[in-house]
Image (cartoon, rainbow, N blue to C red):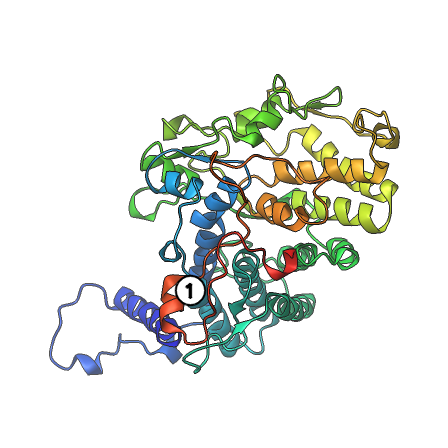
Amino acid sequence: MKSIIKSSVLSLVSMISFMFSGCEQLVEGINENPNQLTLEEVDAGLFMNGAQLSNINIQLGPYSRMAAYYSGQLIGYEQVERFRYQYEVVNTDFDWSGYQSVVNPAREIRRRTEGNALYQGITKVLEAHVVGTYASLFGDIPYSEAISDVDDPVFDNQLVVFEKLQTLLDGAISDLENSSGQVIAQDFIFAGNRVKWLESAWTLKARYYMSTKQYEQAYQAALNGISLPRNSMRFTPLDLQGENSTKNKYFIVLQNGPNLGTGDSYLMQLLDAENPVSRNNEKTNESARSAYYYIDRLNSTSNMGIAHELESQPLLTYEENLLILAESGARTQGLVVGLEHLNSLRAYLNSGAFLNINFAGLSHVYLPYLASDFEVGGMENMDGIDPIRALLREIVEERYVSGFTMFMPFDDARRLRKGDSDIAVPFPLNIPTATLNIERFLVPEDEMTTNENAPVDPGLFSPTQVNQ
């Protein structure tokens, strides 16, 4: 791991050096070229944009699609996406590139900017985001000895990693609370807006507390989390031309062929008013969201909703924060508190603000629920379960729907499977021969072959520690 990480930073220096030197011909005395930068001469800010874009690629790339396959939201139809959908993955399908492309430059920025609290806080959030995603998906991972001179870093216990990330985020929060709101040109996400980064840090803390089932801590963290839709952390493609263009990650995949789509996935069944499992009722009309979420696999340019080439994609959102408040609040504060937060989300959904202009005119209704709706015999409790459980079931289902294209549905499925199966979303397995759901991703092959401390891979169907 060590040599790969070092090479990534040096490669970035070489790239920046090339940008300065342009297309000048090689001449004698190149070692004296004043345009040849060293690592120390590169502005720390130049690392920021690359680290953020790398994190975006990890959060919205193949792992996101696989998580959607394994939670009943997407269908893989052809080529590698079909293999992944059918659980046919091997260790070589995975990598931990984020150590080199996100964690390493984030730490380099911090080393260079000890007196700049804003840089310190932003880079700690970036590191916590990518490492927490790896810990959630893979279980035990290298962390305490990663990005170091240790040739064979130990694999830290998953719970220990989450504890370390909570401490890192505490540091980020302290930095951001004591920083100024200056604009950073290299901050692709929030342009140096410290309030948005601060709220994202709190929501990330809440997300990880949900993962470890520390619901009281999750609730308290989310109270400080993303407070407005415009403060959500999202990847927004730039409407540029040629080599500098950026595109929605789903649009990019769809351009390569009809390999994936929503099809008749369980997610789409939930949104279909005519389907027996539909979540539509007299207070809920999902017509607009169904159309917005639909991904046409046969024609990439026909997708005008969530897979449109310039549609923004969620990383950490206002919706997730409200739903953390709703679930953790219901669990720790009671039905009234949980319902209040759920209805706050429904009011936002009812405004239609989550839709783009192509779907804002379609039917969408999200009227507030009443406590009586979750009492035995109420519209959300026709099977007569405990009212709190009925509310939690609705909240979890909303997390499943609102979390489309994020890891939230996959994380929830694994978190709830053992002790809360009565409120979990009952999506089916993808193939008739399957008997178990995916519980984790496989340790990357290069880590297995080069790190003497790598454990025996527990396999796809073995729950990670937080879900045992």
- Residue 407, how many percent across, how many down? 56, 48
Query: Can you say which quadrant of the picture contains the C terminus?
Result: bottom right
Furthest residue to the left?
A: 28
Seen at 40% across and 42% down, the residue is 247
Can residue 360 be seen from the camera position used here? Answer: no
Residue extending farthest top: 274
All told, the count of numbered labels is: 1
Quarter of the image for residue 158 reads bottom right
User: Observer-nearest residue: 322 or 182?
Assistant: 322
Residue 74: tell me if it is visible. Answer: yes
Residue 162: x percent and y percent? 63, 65
Residue at the (61%, 20%) spot, across then down: 275
Is residue 101 left or right of 26 when viewed as pictured? right
Q: Quadrant of residue 40?
A: bottom left
Nearer to me, 181 or 154: 154
Instruction: Indicate the secondary structure of the residue bearing disc 1.
Output: helix
User: Is residue 184 found left or right of 424 in the rendered image?
Assistant: left
Which residue lies under the disc numbered 1? 101
Residue 30, image x, y percentages: 17, 79
Between 77 and 106, the residue placed more toward the observer is 77
Specify the quadrant that holds the N terminus.
bottom left
Residue 49 sits above or below residue 142 on the image: above
The image quadrant that residue 278 belongs to is top right
Determine whether, in the image, residue 323 is placed left or right of residue 407. Answer: right
| Disc 1 crowd, CA 10 A, few/some/many (<14, 14-19, 20+) | many
Write the residue at 70% across / 42% down.
421
Q: Residue at x 39, y 76 (%)?
A: 2
The amino acid sitting under disc 1 is: Ser
Q: Position of residue 350 (x, y in %)?
A: 70, 28
Q: Height in image: 276 above or below 442?
A: above
